[in-house]
Amino acid sequence: MSGPRVVGIGGTTRPGSSGERLVRAVLAACEDRGATTRMFGGADLAALPHFAPEIPERTEAQRDFVAAVRECDGLVIGTPGYHGGVSGLVKNAIDLLEDLNAGTRVYFDRRAVGLVVSAAGWQACGVTLQALRGIVHAMRGWPTPIGIALNSAEQRPFDEDGRLIDNALTRQVALQAEQILFLAGAAR
Ligand SMILES: Cc1cc2nc3c(=O)[nH]c(=O)nc-3n(C[C@H](O)[C@H](O)[C@H](O)COP(=O)(O)O)c2cc1C
């Protein structure tokens, strides 16, 4: 049996998106522990048409995204705090996963979902993380106990090449990866 498959979703279209960097850091920590990963970053999410429940046709990008989530064993979702909540870009991708509403494993069923929020203040970090947890619960997923929040107005956790250099965040990234893979192993 091959290693667990972990899908990362998130970030913004902004070059150097801090949220996308953090999601990628969690995926890298999962790879270090034997997982294979796939990332859908800001540019990928921007290529997904606006979800419309009455339109059954799907673009290739939409099909690819839904299939990757259907086949995965765990997820990482990262969003900026935009106006006190999850960004439209990230929520649009999540809404497309309504395509997983049937079958033996609907939505995020039996999958751990690591959550990452980047916002310019602690208040938006907290409320957005809480909102994201509510979304994952609604979709039958298991938010990991470790949620990661970055206050981009106060913290500078990356070096000039975009590598995570903050010790506390690096520990949280490792813990979150372990928690995602713990449940992935149990569910398999
Ligand atoms: C449209 C918009 C709305 C935002 N709303 C908030 C907000 O309500 N609270 C907050 O703390 N930061 C807010 N921000 C700041 C972003 O959350 C912050 O810059 C974040 O780190 C961006 O993530 P990124 O580095 O992945 O692009 C907002 C930014 C934008 C562009």
Image: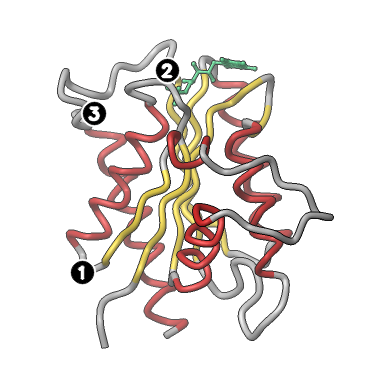
| Mark 3 or mark 1: whose residue is earlier in sequence | 1
For image coordinates 45% across by 34% down, the residue present is: 42
Label pair 3/1, CB-CB below 8 angstroms: no
Count of labels in the image: 3
Which residue position holds label 2?
A: 152
Q: Amino acid at mark 3?
A: Asp
Q: Position of residue 56 (x, y in %)?
A: 74, 61
Q: CA distance from mark 3 to mark 1?
A: 23 Å
Using residue 71 as the reference point, say whether residue 159 is left or right of it: left
Q: Which mark is residue 142?
A: none
Q: Amino acid at mark 1?
A: Gly
| Mark 3 or mark 2: whose residue is earlier in sequence | 2
Q: Position of residue 114 (x, y in %)?
A: 46, 53
User: What is the quadrant of the C terminus in the image?
Assistant: bottom left
Q: Position of residue 68 (x, y in %)?
A: 45, 65
Q: Is mark 2 within 8 Å of ligand 1?
A: yes
Which residue position holds label 3?
A: 166
Residue 140 quadrant: bottom right
User: What is the quadrant of the N terminus in the image?
Assistant: bottom left
Q: Amino acid at mark 2?
A: Ser
| Mark 2 or mark 1: whose residue is earlier in sequence | 1
Which residue position holds label 1?
A: 34
SS label for mark 3: loop
How many C-alpha atoms fall within 10 Å of the one at disc 2: few (<14), some, or many (≥20)?
A: some
Q: Is mark 3 within 8 Å of ligand 1?
A: no
Q: CA distance from mark 2 to mark 1?
A: 30 Å
Q: CA distance from mark 3 to mark 2?
A: 13 Å
How many C-alpha atoms fall within 10 Å of the one at disc 3: few (<14), some, or many (≥20)?
A: few
For image coordinates 35% across by 69% down, the residue present is: 5
For image coordinates 68% across by 40% down, the residue present is: 50
Q: Position of residue 180 (x, y in %)?
A: 40, 63
